[in-house]
Image (tube, helix red, strand yellow):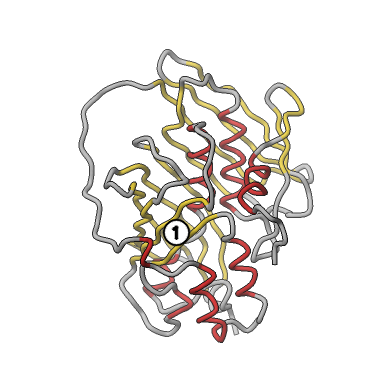
Amino acid sequence: MNESPDPLLDLLRLLDLEQIERDIFRGVSRSSLVPRVFGGQVAAQALVAAGRTVPDDRGAHSLHSYFLRAGDPGAPIVYTVDRIRDGRSFTTRRVVAVQHGQPIFHLSASFQTHEEGMEHQATMPAAPDPETLPTAAEMLPRYADRFSDPGVVDRLIEAREAVDLRYVDAPPFGTVGEAREPRSQVWFRTNGKLADDPLLHVCMATYVSDMTLLDSVLLAHGRGGWAVGDVVGASLDHAMWFHRPFRADEWLLYDQESPSASGGRGLGQARIYTADGRLAITVIQEGVVRIPRG
């Protein structure tokens, strides 16, 4: 287990990249459930790198990214930023993450000055009060018998120490063998207050967005996931649109579904709402989802 007295501070340090040249940054990694860099980490770090080259009056409104190679958690990651465009209202940045001389991740992000415009949004779906749901530390030990490795529960809890993530219904590993509607909901917020920097909240949500998005793919087929060992896979691409201001240290509802799986790939799409019903973020991700060969 993580013995740090403040896991959230550790995560914030992870996102606080070292600047080594004008548009070049370096980051480190934390341990993951799988022997590669967690996709949400590299996406969040790349967005940090992009955001640090953008004027403070321009907030991130979208990102589009591709996971190219598995990252090595034992080696630093170098992020190179290209200043593609600085317009009157929009700024565009391209970021390439490199390890061992090879690109492992590519991100394009766009930033915009604040402006007023037309307003409408999808209605927030029904969901229980997050305070009535079990925490990860309360919920995960119930499913210890689903994992062949007895250390998985501790590692799952450790991975969520900085973020309070609560499932509305049983996670995929809780109903192995039972096909369910391809939809999943979780509430999340950081385990502690964050500074008021809007980029920090956007990057924190980016980090969390990769934790559960493909759960709905697994639910449709009664699969438990990578920790159970009945599927293998990895994220392929990840896109996010940031619609309205939000705080990642206040409850956010992550409403996820999978419209399709085919060709060894599964698609997840989601909307993230604030607790008072504002649509804050839209997320879409495709990943490799394969049944292991016997």
Residue nearest the observer in this picture, 215 or 277: 277
Dividing the picture into quadrants, the one containing residue 96 is: top right
Crowding near the residue tagged with mark 1, few <14, some 14–19, many ≥20 C-alpha atoms within 10 Å? many
Please state the horizontal and vertical placement of residue 277, each as a whole percent of the image: 27, 47
Question: Residue 257, image x and y in percent?
Answer: 34, 61
Which of the 4 image quadrants contains residue 232? bottom right
Q: Residue at x 25, y 51 (%)?
A: 124
Which residue is at the far top?
88
Q: Amino acid at mark 1?
A: Leu
- Position of 15 compared to 204: left or right? right
Report the quarter where the N terminus lies: bottom right
User: Residue under circle 1?
Assistant: 213
Is 23 placed left or right of 63 in the picture? right
Picture coordinates of residue 244, whole percent (x, y): 34, 36
Residue in the foreground of this view, choosing between 58 and 69: 58
Quadrant of the image for the C terminus?
bottom right
The residue positioned 44% from the left and 59% from the top of the image is 213
Residue 186 x/y as whole percent: 40, 61
Q: Is residue 156 above or below residue 294?
A: above
Q: Secondary structure at mark 1?
A: loop
Residue shown at the point (51%, 31%) measured from the top left: 197
277 or 115: which is nearer to us?
277
Residue under the point 61% across and 61% down: 159
Q: Vertical placement of 183 versus 117: above or below?
A: below
Instruction: Give the tally of numbered discs.
Output: 1
Instruction: State left or right for residue 226 relative to residue 36.
Output: left
Relative to 166, is 74 on the left or the right? right
